[in-house]
Amino acid sequence: MTSRTAKPGRPAALVVLPLIVLALVFGTLPMWTDDYWIRVWTGVAMWAGLAASWNIIGGYAGYISFGHVAFFGIGAYATAILMQPGYDWNFFLTLPVGAVIAGLFALIVGWPTLRLRGAYFAIATWALAEALAQIINTLDFTGGSFGLSTPGNPSTWFFYYAMLIATILIYLLTFLLFERSRFGYKVKAVRDNEAAAQSLGINTTAVKLQAFMLSAALPAVLGGINAYWITFINPQSVLSGEVTDQMVVMTLIGGLGHLWGPALGAFVLYLASTWLGAEYGGSTSYIAMIGALLAIIILFLPDGLIGLAPRARGMKLVRKMLGLSGAPGGGGAGTAPPGGRP
Amino acid sequence: MSAVEVKDLRRSFGGIKAVAGVSFEVQPAEIVGIIGPNGSGKSTLFSLLSGTIAPTSGTIRLDGRDVTRMPAYRIARMGLGRTFQIPTPFTNMTVRENLLAAAVESDWANARSRADEVLEALEITHVADDLAGTLSGGQLRLLEFGRVQMRDAETILLDEVTAGVNPRLRQIILARVRALQEKGKTFLIIEHDMELVRSVCERIIVMDAGEIVFEGSFEEVASNEVVIDAYLGRPAA
Amino acid sequence: MVRAMQLLIQTVIDGLLVGGLYVAISIGFSLAFGILDVVDFAVGEWVVLGGFAGVAAHTWLGIDPIVFLPAVFVIFALIGSLVAPLIYRVRTSRYARPALMALAFTFGIAMLARGTMLTTVGFDPRTVQTSLVGGTLTIGGVHMPWLRLAGFLFAIVTTALFMGFLFFTRTGLAVRAAAQNKRNAGLMGIDVKRLSTIVYAIYAGLTAMAGVLIGAIYTFTAQVGPQYSLLAFFVVVMAGLGSIGGVLVAGLFLGMLQALVTVYVGADYTLAIVFGVLFVVLLVSPQGVLRRGLAA
């Protein structure tokens, strides 16, 4: 379940080359495609970011949050409210506000429940999301069930780049924190064996809370951008349980606890849902479909789609193609032969 | 000042007194063995010392500081390291990552090179990048022992680290324990292997039914009536 | 003053009557949790599916849903006995995190059920029509619709039967043993897989039957599943996961709490207050406030 991207010693070209190609493709996307596809890719970027945020608590910390839409919604409402006439906040300044509020909510919910077994946490987060939707339905300054409009309407590419950059930053942060730093080791150690982690001096409660707060703050930022993008929000749209469903399913289908799993899941599922919507209309069959897909993946492919392409096999092929087969493997998997050892 | 000082420590589960009033001291750089039949409270004692469970009453001092009822992670940060009788690997992390994870609250700057040393010393370099969940029982114990070394703790509790480990690696573990003792580390060791206890422990505490029934050198223990009755007389399960 | 008193009594009675149904939803759910060690996120979907089965009985078969209840039990027990082995398989697998995967698995089952219902019947609100039970019983100015009384009675009877099964049959004893300690139960030669299938089947059938009655009392749509799940969670968390006696008290308490909030605060705040109470319970007493005595 561990991603092993970019181990030291692997030829840099293998990492850098695809990244340059990806950067070129996605960086110039608005120049060579139409509005429809820009919007589709904005959606892919957003869901990749949302699933990656969920993966922090679900995959790295090992606690399933079934109420993550609450944080997405908090971000959406923070941005929409602060941009209302009378407040007139700058759009970019509203994003950190949403993130901080979402983080605080995570602290309040996580504090009692993260000490308990996972089921309590799953229930508490779900209850939070349902209750929040109901409260916002009744409040005045949130526009109640009618919702809120956001002012102004920048171009399609503005939102594309905003979403893309936010999501890239989320991945960068996840990569640095969870694959490259002490914090990542702490979180994974707590996930795998809490008692052992404590015996190593890790403050497990604090580590879990930090991971959950981070996992909550990031979707709030995406929620804020989304609120500005779709120009109109209400509890049915930005606090719908379906948002959580998608985050969970995309992560699990892509690969739980893998850095790139959520991106892969978001890519596959968002394009599939767009196609289904265009072909058959309506989204109810989509719910049934992803439910079935989730069950099937868990039964037969618990590592997700990313588990289909074991790194060892895939990279060997790429190396051969690049003529790098003789390059030293460094700390890569399976480099030392087990010859003769007990 | 003692490295470990325990006074009248008690812990009961329901009506069962797992640890029933235990007091002892361990001096710095001492290696003390704890023996006793299964269920005599040895592992519970370790859990009490490391803060994994809280005592019903009594006090525990580490280097003179009262650590009674402190959370486990704070006791660990005050210089206590332990292994678990049932190995507790981080199953979804590689062996190397397991070792690195053990250093997050100690010398992190040199963690990588220290992990390499430990892998080498315990002869598990060939499985360094395998997931810990795939290791054999003996390898898991080595990893458990390796992790506690990464901790760089001053006082180390070893709970049957050599069970299921082949004789040659057992010698390696013993050599490591002695080398660490030279550096001033203190050890408390639960062991069923009497040969090992004799060769490494300077003092032995014998437990039975949650109490200390005898304390002394191996020779004294081996010739003591009470001990023979409580432990040596019965075949170790 | 008298009218205020009467309103209070009426509200409490209403709440208790509804609470009976919550007990009926939660009791099987609680035990399924105990034995499978998985919180079934599909619990609310079983309720809604049961409701639709009641609607189908009336509109397609022309059978009164109340008469149809035994058939509902059999149908959903069968479906449940197909789902249970899958959950068991995930829960006992050698995956990295089986507990978490099993949770997500039931979540997937819930989505599959909800999506299928939405696709086939849409968003329209429905009610289960029954002509067998109607009218209202009035005692001292307190009104009790016969339908709700029937629902309450059903809850009491099924709970009693269920308790009887648990405490007076051999299988029931094995279930209680397994719910307390699966490893030991396994050692004692109890087939935990078969037991969990039996329990899950009974739970699914029971919950769907409760769904028929709930659908007769309240209007429902294909979307309301999660709300019933939430109520079942509330009851089970209050009771302490796996405690049968606690479920009885917690279910009635929830019904009363909900009725009181609806009357005295406003229907829009029920979920928020229910959540607030749940939160405080988790904070103060994570093992559940009622976990004493009758632990199953």
Image (cartoon, grey):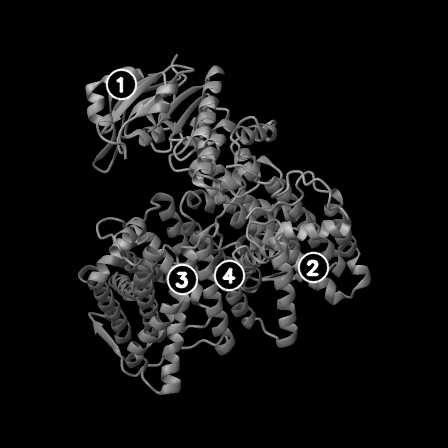
Between marks 1 and 3 in the image, the one whose residue lies nearer the viewer = 1
Determine whether, in the image, residue A51 is placed left or right of residue A119.
right
Secondary structure state at the residue bearing disc 3: helix
Circle 3: residue type: Ser
Residue marked by disc 2: A42
User: At x 67% / y 43%, what residue is drawn?
Assistant: A6
User: Is B122 situated above or below C30?
Assistant: above
For the image shown, how many numbered marks are present on the structure?
A: 4
Name the residue located 58 percent from the left edge and 35 percent from the top edge. A182
Residue type pointed to by label 1: Val
Numbered mark located on residue A300 in the image: 4
> Disc 1: which chain?
B
Helix or strand or loop: what does disc 4 sit on?
helix
Of callouts 4 and 2, the N-terminal one: 2
- Circle number at residue B221: 1
Q: Which residue is mark 3?
A: C229
Q: CA distance from mark 1 to mark 4?
A: 57 Å
